[in-house]
Amino acid sequence: MDVLSPEQRRKNMIRIRGKNTAPEMLLRRELHAAGLRFRLHPRTLPGRPDMIFPRYKTAVLVNGCFWHGHDCTLFKLPETRRDFWSAKIAGNRARDRRNQTALLNQGWRVLTVWECALKGRNRKPMSDVIAACSAFIRGTDHESELTGQWHLG
């Protein structure tokens, strides 16, 4: 049973942002300081990636571990309404796969940066995150991800 009333739950959910999140803003600030220039949330690309680097034909997705069902310490399926949340997160993951495949098919390179790489007990030093992002953006790999466990490649 939910401890909040439907009206309180609705107000909480409305305040959850889909773009310009704290992890996204942190990464954007650091990449810009490193001299990398990007565009934000282009409407013409599948899934409207968080950042694109047109010069390098690279899209960067900054995924929240909860909303995208990442297998890390920051994700825990809620105890209430488990069926709803399982379906919701499975749908988000399926949509992520479709969008990433569409980006790759259009010739874009895709880097997924997970929230756990930027915060939490397993986070990496920001200098290491930026170095890894820069290497991918300027490199030739087609897809990769950065996590708190460093699954780069």
Image: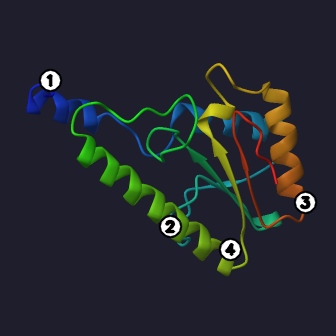
Whole-percent x, y for residue 75 in the image: 48, 34
The numbered disc on residue 62 is none
- State the quadrant of the N terminus: top left
120 or 18: nearer the viewer: 120
Residue at (25%, 47%) from the top-left corner?
83
Badge number at residue 139 = 3
Question: Which residue is labeled 4 in the image?
Answer: 104
Q: CA distance from mark 3 to mark 2?
A: 25 Å
Q: Amino acid at mark 2?
A: Arg
| Residue at 53% over, 72% down | 44
- Tell me the distance, in whole angstroms, between the alpha carbons under discs 1 and 2: 35 Å
Mark 3: secondary structure? loop
Amino acid under disc 1: Leu
* Residues marked 2 and 4 touching at CB (< 8 Å): no
Closer to the chain start, of discs 1 and 2, is: 1
| Badge 2 element | loop
In the picture, the disc for residue 43 is 2
Any part of residue 4 in sight: yes
For discs 2 and 4, the disc positioned in front in the rendered view: 4
Q: Closer to us: mark 1 or mark 2?
A: 1
For image coordinates 21% across by 39% down, the residue present is 81
Look at the numbered discs 4 and 3 and tell me whether their residues touch, using CB distance below 8 Å: no
Inspect the image, locate mark 4, and give the three-letter code of the amino acid beneath it: Leu
Residue situated in front as seen by the camera: 18 or 71: 71
10 Å crowding of disc 2: few (<14), some (14-19), many (20+) = few
Packing grade of label 4 (10 A; few <14, some 14-19, many >=20) is some
What is the secondary structure assignment of the residue under circle 4? helix
Circle 1 residue:
4
**Looking at the figure, which quarter contains the C terminus?**
bottom right
